[in-house]
Image: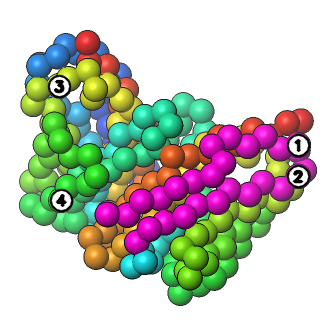
């Protein structure tokens, strides 16, 4: 079954404690991206990756890191989380038949709370 | 960078009526405009998309129109049904950097 798998689904942590949210896709997609969703703000792009070892900043990259060492995985790293990073996070990947970010397929989301 | 504005933020319609959501974008180079539907507690899912070389696209009860000159595009849902109740997001993308910028979303409620 084609899917984007994010883990964990829910995470409660404290300010300053490093964390990683994993994302893996089994569709051989080249393009992967991270978004955060906040009420009234929609989906805002954090980072995206066009292929292995190629990453670029989205609109809200501050406080986040990513890596793309393998095609299927695109982890999101918060080195020192702060309460303003409390949000619902989505990983997404897209097919390679057209423009890289067309027809995004989203993971189930990770609800992060930073206390 | 691209700025996408979406209106209205909430929309309540009677079952069977039509719903229209409008978006504007700022980057004239943007060439790809998808719409995503997010049901409560679920992931966003693509429902329809349009490229800048097409003015209109239809898929059953859903249609999208694009006005490049005015830099706006709209989603039209006809004969609304309860299962159309969800949050709808528009988005725009430029081929210059392949970012995908989303609008703030429209919560659609279909009243039975």
Badge 4 crowding class, 10 Å Cα cut-off, few under 14, some 14 to 19, many 20 or more, is: some
Q: Are marks 1 and 3 on the same chain?
A: no
Q: CA distance from mark 1 to mark 3?
A: 44 Å
Q: Are marks 4 and 2 on the same chain?
A: no
Is residue B26 in the magenta section?
yes
Residue with the mark numbered 1: B14
Q: Is residue B54 visible?
A: yes
Q: CA distance from mark 2 to mark 1?
A: 6 Å
Q: Is residue A113 above or below residue B81?
A: above
Residue with the mark numbered 4: A56
| Side (left or right) of A56 relative to B101 | left
CB contact under 8 Å: marks 2 and 1: yes
Residue B70 picture quarter: bottom right
Q: Are marks 2 and 1 on the same chain?
A: yes
Q: CA distance from mark 4 to mark 2?
A: 43 Å
Quarter of the image where the N terminus of chain B is located: bottom left
Residue B38 picture quarter: top right
Helix or strand or loop: what does disc 1 sit on? strand
Task: Give the image location of residue A21, x and y in percent.
Answer: 23, 34
Residue with the mark numbered 3: A81
Residue with the mark numbered 2: B17
Task: Check the residue under mark 1 and report the chain it is in.
Answer: B
Q: Are marks 3 and 2 on the same chain?
A: no
Badge 3 crowding class, 10 Å Cα cut-off, few under 14, some 14 to 19, many 20 or more, is: many
Q: Residue at x 15, y 46 (%)?
A: A66
């Amino acid at each position: 079954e084609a899917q984007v798998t994010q883990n964990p689904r829910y995470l409660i942590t404290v300010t300053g404690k490093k964390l990683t949210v994993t994302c893996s896709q089994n569709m051989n997609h080249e393009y992967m991206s991270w978004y955060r969703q906040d009420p009234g703000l929609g989906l805002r792009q954090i980072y995206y990756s066009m292929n292995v070892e190629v990453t670029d900043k989205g609109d809200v990259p501050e406080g986040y890191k990513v890596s793309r060492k393998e095609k299927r995985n695109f982890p999101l790293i918060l080195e020192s989380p702060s309460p303003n990073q409390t949000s619902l996070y989505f990983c997404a990947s897209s097919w390679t038949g057209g423009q890289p970010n067309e027809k995004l397929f989203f993971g189930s989301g990770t609800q992060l709370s930073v206390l | 960078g691209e700025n996408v504005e979406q209106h209205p933020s909430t929309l309540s319609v009677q079952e069977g009526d039509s719903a229209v959501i409008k978006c504007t974008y700022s980057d004239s180079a943007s060439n790809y405009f998808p719409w995503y539907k997010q049901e409560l507690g679920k992931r966003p899912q693509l429902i329809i998309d349009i490229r800048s070389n097409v003015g209109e696209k239809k898929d059953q009860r859903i249609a999208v129109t694009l006005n490049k000159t005015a830099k706006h595009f709209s989603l039209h849902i006809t004969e609304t049904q309860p299962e159309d109740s969800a949050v709808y997001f528009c988005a725009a993308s430029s081929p210059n950097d392949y970012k995908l910028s989303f609008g703030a979303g429209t919560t659609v409620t279909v009243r039975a």
